[in-house]
Amino acid sequence: MPDVLSAPLVVEFPFTRSLGPVQSAFLTGLRERTVLGVRADDGTVLVPPVEYDPVTANELGDLVEVAPIGTVTTWAWNPSPRRDQPLDTPFAWVLVRLDGAGTALLHALDAPGPDAVATGMRVRIRWAATRTGAITDIACFEPYEGEPGPSEPAPHTGEFTDPVTGIVAPARLDYVHTPGRAQSAYIKALEERRTVGERCPSCRKVYVPPRGACPTCGVATAEQVEVGPRGTVTTFCIVNIKAKNLDIEVPYVYAHIALDGADLALHGRIAGIPYDQVRMGLRVEPVWSEGARHVDHYRPTGEPDADYDTYKELV
């Protein structure tokens, strides 16, 4: 039986976004240990605040301050915290309706165990020692047995010194990928600097990388077909933002490339030509990584450009 291939993979995208006046006031307020909500058209105080009414879609801007004390409306115990979660010891995820708010805020509750958590229990915010204007300025919630906060929220201008105007929202997925039969054959062929696809027995299209089944006909594929190594640029984009973990100077070109004999374009980087000279129809060939089992980039072959009619179905 052949060895089963597997590899850890990480998909990460730090999304940078600007903030409107409502979100800016909310996050700046957290930095100043102030929780702001916004009043909806029906009078409900929404915490966290949103920029538009969820019912009427009208723009909202009537900001109010609510208490840092509230009531747990529902919860779930987390026995095994993951990387970058609020606490590194077991805790409860809770929805908390702060006093003066009409909606609940999701965050972590620091509790010794699930028996110490209950719907209806009173909690308060534990503020982070260092606050930067982010939801993590609330370190977590903690049990509270003191006096309730004001039941009516207080009007607030939303004005602070040095307001937060933008945030970086990191998105990351860690997982272990185990390829199937078709992908394993594709990967092993790359070790020999070959590219193989599989042909659909019904429509006769050759898919690269192979998927084990035809996405059009829905039937299994098994017939291996070697394609390339040369191909044609069908479309491309110029990348002007440098990736954190990619040692490639910008600008550079990433393209869809239809390898000769394939009916599906794969993607790859184009080098060996100024970025502003890359074009649809450009004929390219692979340049393999030194000591690696994959194509590092594609470069021009010097052949005449392919006629549009030869690759228009793959654009």
Image (spheres, grey):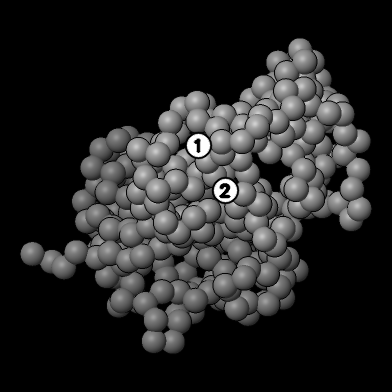
In this view, the residue in front, 39 or 59, is 39
Quarter that holds the N terminus: bottom left
Residue type, label 2: Cys
Front residue of 243/57: it is 57
At mark 2, the secondary structure is strand
Q: Which residue is mark 1?
A: 94
Rendering quarter of residue 189: bottom left
Residue 147 is situated, as x and y percent measured from the top left of the image, at 65, 32
| Label 2 – label 1 distance at C-alpha | 10 Å
Residue 201 badge: none
Q: Is residue 106 left or right of residue 114?
A: right
- Work out whether 125 lies above or below 99: below
- In the displayed structure, does residue 270 sit left or right of residue 294? right
On the image, the x and y values in percent for residue 26 come to 77, 41
Q: Is residue 39 above or below residue 247?
A: above
Instruction: Tell me if label 2 and label 1 are in contact, CB under 8 Å.
Output: no
Where 44 sits versus 11, above or below? above
Q: Is residue 115 visible?
A: yes
Toward which corner of the image does residue 228 lie, by quadrant? Answer: bottom left
Residue sitting at x 35%, y 49%: 79
Q: Residues within 10 Å of mark 1 (few under 14, many from 20)?
A: many
Extreme residue in the left direction: 1
Residue located beneath label 2 in the image: 140
Which residue is at 28% across, 44% downward? 213
What residue lies at 75% left-to-right and 48% top-to-bottom?
33
Mark 2 or mark 1: whose residue is earlier in sequence: 1
Q: Is residue 45 left or right of residue 161?
A: left
Mark 1: amino acid:
Val
